[in-house]
Image (cartoon, grey):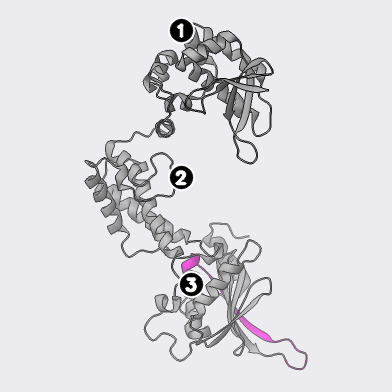
Amino acid sequence: MRDIVFTRANGWIPNVIREDGELKVMLGAGADATHSPREFTFPIREAHLAVIRADLGRHLLLWSAVLPLCDAAGTRGRLDEDAAVALLDPVLLAAPADVDAFFGRAPWDRGRLIAHGADVELLERGQLCAAIRAATETSDEKRAQEHHANRRRAERGVVLGPLDTALLKYTGQYLHGATIPKRVPDAVDPALLPEVMRVVATAERACAGMRIGRDPRRGKRATDKRDWGRMEAAVDAAVRRAHPDLAADAIRTVSFLMCSEAADRSRNAPLEDDEEITGGPGEGAGTRKTVLSFTDDKGVEKKWRAGGGRTASAEFWEFVGDRSAGDNEVFTVEDEELGEGIQLHFYADTAARVMTVRKGRGGSDPEYRVEYTLIDGMSGYRTLVSAYVRGGWAGLDRHGSWLPDAAELERARRRRDGRPDA
C-alpha cells in the first residue's frame, strides 16, 4: 500500500511516500521505451523527511543529485538504490560548506536548479547552498534552456553581443541551433528590432531573384543542395560585408532563414515547367517531342503524351521523385519511334545520349551511337532533360561535352573528382 506523506505544489519535485510502512522518495525521471516518464523510489529516514519538509533548497539539491542516477538507469534498468541512499546524508544533513564540497566531486543536474531560480553566478563558483536560497517551487524551463545554450556557445568560444542575441531570438534559434528558423519579431527587444530588420533586409537583397529548386533524386520534397549552398554563400557574404561586427552564429542564422524560406517555397510549389524556365526563344522549334517513355533501373515505365496538360519535364521529374532510391539511380527519357533517348546516371553525375544507327534485322543486333557527358548537379540534369524534350538528339549538342566512349568518360570523371588516372 502506498500513501503520499509529503508533496509540493510542483508535482515534478520528488514526493515522499510511505510504502508498506517504509518512507521513500518517489520521483519521475527519464523515459521508458515508449517515451513515458519512468518512476523511481528509494528509502529515506525520518530525519531526511524533516529536512525535505522544511528546506526547499535542500530538497531541490537532492533532486539534482539523484537525476544522474536516473539517467544511468536508462529506459529499463534499475535505479542504483545504494548510490541514491548514499546521497541523503551529504546533501540533506551536512553543513553548507560540506554540501558544496560534496557537489564539487559528485555529478548533478545543473538545469534543474537553474529552472527553479538558483543564482547562476553562485552555481558557477560552486556555492550551491547560497545559490539555491533564491529558488522557488515553480520552474522556468526557458531559463535553464537559455543557460544551457549559452554554455554550449561558450565551449565553442562564442561571445554574443546584443544584436547577435536579438537575431538568434528573431529566428527562433537562440535556444536550439538546429531548430528550423522562422520570423518571431515579438521575441526581440523592441529597441533592437529596427537593427534586426536592417540585417534581414540586407540578406533579402542579397538573395533576391535566387531560388532553391527541387531535387527529385532525393525524394519528392527534397531541394537542391547546390542551390542552397549558393544562396547561403551570397547571404553570408553580403551580411558580413554590411554588418562586420556580427558574430558568425548570427550571420549563419540569417542565411539559414533565407534558405529555409526559399526551400519551403519550392517544396510547396508544383514541379517547375523546365521547358519554360531553361528554354531559349525558338530553341527546338519544330522538333519538340510529343510522345516519350520514361523508365528507371527497375524496369518500371511511364508514358507521356503532349496535350495532357503537363509538360514532359514536370512528369519526368515527378516520376524520378516517386522512384529514385539508393538502388535505383539510372533513369531514361526515350523517343521509341525515333529510337533515341537520354540516360541519366545519378550515382555518377553523368549522362549518355543514345541514337539507333541501324535497326536489327534478320536476327542481327541493332547498332547504337552512344555519347557521354559529365553533369554539374541537379541544374545540369534539368537543363539536359528540357533540351532533349525541346530538340531531341540535336538539341543536346550545346548542352554537354559529348565523349565517344565510356573509357574517356571515366578519365574525365577522374579528372573532375581529382583522382589520378588509373
**What's under tag 3, amino acid-wise?**
Arg
Residue 77, compared with residue 242, is above or below; it is above
Name the foreground residue: 98 vs 45. Answer: 45
Secondary structure beneath label 1: helix
Q: Quadrant of residue 140?
A: top left
Indicate which disc residue 178 carries: 2
Q: Element type at marker 2?
A: loop
The answer to whether residue 263 shows anywhere in this view is: yes
Query: Against 138, is 214 above or below?
Result: below
Q: Secondary structure at mark 3?
A: helix
Where in the figure is residue 306, as x and y percent of width and height?
A: 51, 87
Q: Which residue is mark 1?
A: 97
Q: Which residue is mark 3?
A: 382
Q: Amino acid at mark 1?
A: Ala
Mark sitting earlier along the chain (1/3): 1
Residue at figure coordinates x 45%, y 75% from the top left:
274
Q: Residue 153 location in percent, x, y?
A: 41, 34
- Label 2 and label 1: CA atoms lie apart by 40 Å
Q: Which mark is residue 136?
A: none
Quarter of the image with the C terminus is bottom right
Q: Amino acid at mark 2?
A: Ala
Nearer to us in this view, 349 or 107: 107
Residue furthest top in the image? 95
Most extreme residue toward the right is 363
Considering only order in the chain, which callout, 1 or 2, is on the residue closer to the N terminus? Answer: 1
Magenta residues, start to end: 361-379
User: Which residue does the image show at 25% across and 50% down from the upper left?
Assistant: 197
Cα separation, mark 1 vs mark 3, equals 70 Å
Label 3 Cα crowd, 10 Å radius (few <14 / some 14-19 / many 20+): some
Crowd band around label 2 with a 10 angstrom C-alpha radius: few (<14), some (14–19), many (20+) = few
The CA distance from mark 3 to mark 2 is 31 Å
